[in-house]
Image: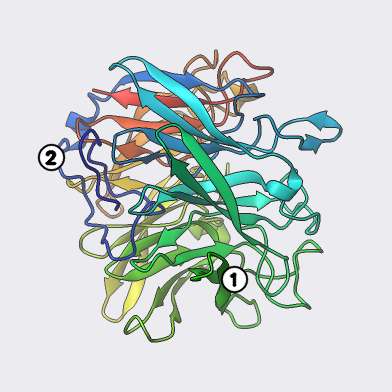
Amino acid sequence: MSRLMVRAPAIGCVLLGATLLTAACSGGSRLSPPHGVADVLALRSESVRYFFSGRPDGDLPTVGHLTFDRHGDLYGATSTGGTGTCKFRGTLTGCGTIFELRPSSKRTWSERVIYSFKNLGDGAGPYGTLSFDSAGHIYGVTMGGGNRGCVPLFWIYRGCGTAFELMRSGNRHWTKRTLHVFSGAADGGNPVGGLVIDSSGNLYGTAYCGESQLQSCYTEGEGDGVFFELEPKKSGSWSEAVLHVFGRHLHDGLHPLGDLTVNAGKIYGTADNVYAMTRASSKSRWRFTQLFEFGDESSQGSYPNGGLAVDAAGNMYGTMGIGGNPSCDCGLIFELHRVGGSLQETILHTFTGGSDGARPDGALTIDSAGLLYGTTSNGGDLLCNNGGGCGVAFVLHPHGVDSTERVLHTFEDDATDGGMPESALVLVNAGSLYGTTEYGGKGPNLGDGTVFEIER
């Protein structure tokens, strides 16, 4: 992952949206974390570091995971809120923000919106993990806006989405430029994951739908998505190239979701399958390989929309938001490990919808002891969310079918500690975990979301 210097905490092996492609995910943080679940259970003190307030601040921080810069400041996105003119059903909601959280002391953090998307044409609904290049510039995507095409498949704004860059000028000012506006046709539409960067400054990502003029994002269910590259030109412009087209007729996956993961020079991703993009050299073409195709949804789950985490041995871990337990469809955690020349799946934990959680929508984070950390958006305190629960943060010791899950924090009914986390957790050197919740705080209904820390 990006090299963290000076004040930056060492972080565990999360989805590598902020990673240079030349780096490898080693499966652990630089400093030694706890060595077992019993030690990790000391991570019981949860504190909200920031409550979002909607407009003009931010709302719904549903990102892949927060990102630390080289100074130790946190960056993330909110899908709505801000000062923009976007509306939903006639109500001014804002188009989303990019924010910075800076620690002023151990207990106090200050938040600043570094960019507020202006209108639909500027991009709407930033989503996925933000990425930093070596110069400190930020890259990301919006799943909507850019144009007025593409009917909202699963979001509230029209538009086929954009890729953008934020360039720092001075200490406190950022300038934004749009790198690409997706058409929803051959170039794809509705990107919903983070971007990864190679050593030449090229960006790689996926779009949920689109593939050709006949399979577009303009009608729900059409277009199975693309894997794309954005290349900077000497003129200052960027060009987009589609490296792979997903298609149900090709049996190579549908609708890629979640952040991409970089390991040993390969880019791993998930659609309704697990795949890898590889190339023999910097001048050769990228090659798509389907590594694993999920079978029965009721037992193996569906919607692996968090992406993958890969450990030092090459084992892959992920979550399914639904499936598993037939009585509640509450999701599961899976492992893919190599047996001979193929990958084999083991279900490590099936969520029950009770105190252990339900609906693990985010990715997993690995520490150097091989423990997995994550969140669920439901389950836990069943007095919350009309009996559905407001989610938990958990740690899992992977050991095949004998894996054990333990809850680190249960988000409570009063929403003062946040509620319904959908993000991955970031593990820092002292053993603290950082994440976001979709709700929580003093806003209407369940609030506008939080940034939280779980510390020793």
What amino acid is labelled 2 in the image?
Answer: Ser
Rendered residue at 60%/20% (across/down): 53
> Does 206 sit left or right of 316 as displayed?
right
On the image, the x and y values in percent for residue 402 come to: 27, 49
Disc 1 secondary structure class: strand
Please state, as top left, top right, bottom left or bottom right, where the C terminus lies in the image.
top left
Q: CA distance from mark 1 to mark 2?
A: 39 Å
| Residue at mark 1 | 226
Graded by Cα atoms within 10 Å as few (under 14), some (14 to 19) or many (20 or more), the crowding at tag 1 reads: many
On the image, the x and y values in percent for residue 43 come to: 26, 25
> Does 153 sit left or right of 439 as displayed?
right
| Residue at mark 2 | 32
Graded by Cα atoms within 10 Å as few (under 14), some (14 to 19) or many (20 or more), the crowding at tag 2 reads: some
Q: How many marks?
A: 2
Mark 1 or mark 2, which has the lower sequence index?
2
Q: Quadrant of residue 98?
A: top right
